[in-house]
Image: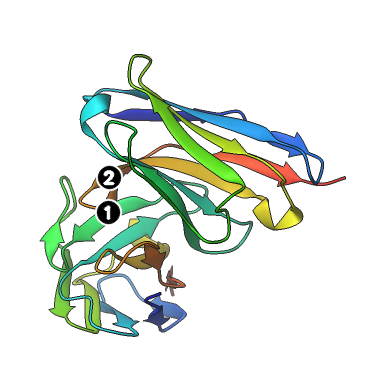
């Protein structure tokens, strides 16, 4: 079955960087676009970024554009999110999900990022 | 950016009752709308896509309808395990992909 397992979350100071990973299994990873979606504590869902199946096309939410970079390694079935210049507003659970025509078909369990001094 | 407004914020019903959740878009999204269920402490789950298509494994008591700017998720007979927050999401005009603010379904 499809499995998406995020890792790399933790507590980080404002202004610092963090890299999240999402390990995929149970489907042909290289055939699907992939997303990051986040959820601040007690809040709703916010789309963060998408990368195409081949890694060539990427789009970002305005709130993270220029600070976050989405990428993938199809040889390792892994999705990444490089997050720079983090602020308290970036505190959230970060989910990876595969795309089904720009819907979010399968989700990981999420990894919590807390930005705090 | 397309804004999705969900109502009501909270729905409190008894088991077996019919639940009707609404999602209104700030401009037409055609039928490019999905619904997700998020149970406490869990990741969201895709329920409905393209307004009315049930995702794999979704019980038949869940149905979606609507087009343009007004959409409805119906739970025909509420079960205790349906307690969750339900979100709508559009893919008509992106980026960004946007979500509604959610409707919390409770059991009386």
**Residue B70 in the image: x percent, y percent?**
23, 85
Q: Are circles 1 and 2 on residues that touch, CB within 8 Å?
A: yes
Residue A29 at least partly seen = yes
* Vertical placement of residue A96 versus A90, above or below: above
Left or right: residue B26 versus residue B65 is right
**Residue A117 in the image: x percent, y percent?**
88, 45
Residue denoted by label 2 = A99
Element marked by disc 2: strand
- 3D distance between C-alphas at marks 1 and 2: 5 Å
Element marked by disc 1: strand
Residue denoted by label 1 = A103
* Residue plotted at (22% across, 76% down): B29
The subunit carrying tag 1 is A
Front residue (pair B43, B16)? B43
Check residue A115 in the rendering and tell me which mark sits there, or answer none.
none
**Residue B8 in the image: x percent, y percent?**
41, 84
* Vertical placement of residue B77 versus A8, above or below: below
Residue A1 at least partly seen = no
Front residue (pair B41, B101)? B101
Front residue (pair A116, B83)? A116
């Amino acid at each position: 079955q499809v499995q998406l397992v995020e890792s790399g979350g933790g507590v980080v100071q404002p202004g610092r960087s963090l890299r999240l990973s999402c390990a995929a299994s149970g489907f042909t990873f290289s055939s699907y676009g992939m997303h990051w979606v986040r959820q601040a504590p007690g809040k709703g869902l916010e789309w963060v970024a998408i990368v195409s199946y081949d890694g060539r096309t990427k789009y970002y939410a305005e709130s993270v554009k220029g600070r976050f970079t989405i990428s993938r390694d199809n040889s390792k079935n892994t999705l990444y999110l490089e997050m720079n210049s983090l602020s308290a507003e970036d505190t959230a659970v970060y989910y990876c999900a595969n795309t089904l025509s720009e819907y979010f078909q399968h989700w990981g369990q999420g990894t919590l990022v807390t930005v705090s001094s | 950016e397309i804004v999705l407004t969900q109502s009501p914020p909270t729905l409190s019903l008894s088991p077996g009752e019919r639940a009707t959740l609404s999602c209104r878009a700030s401009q037409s999204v055609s039928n490019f709308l999905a619904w997700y269920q998020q149970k406490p402490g869990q990741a969201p789950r895709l329920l409905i896509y393209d307004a009315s298509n049930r995702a794999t494994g979704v019980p038949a008591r869940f149905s979606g309808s609507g087009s343009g700017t007004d959409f409805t998720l119906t739970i025909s007979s509420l079960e205790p395990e349906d307690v969750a927050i339900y979100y709508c999401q559009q893919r008509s005009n992106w980026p960004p992909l946007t979500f509604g603010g959610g409707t919390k379904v409770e059991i009386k």
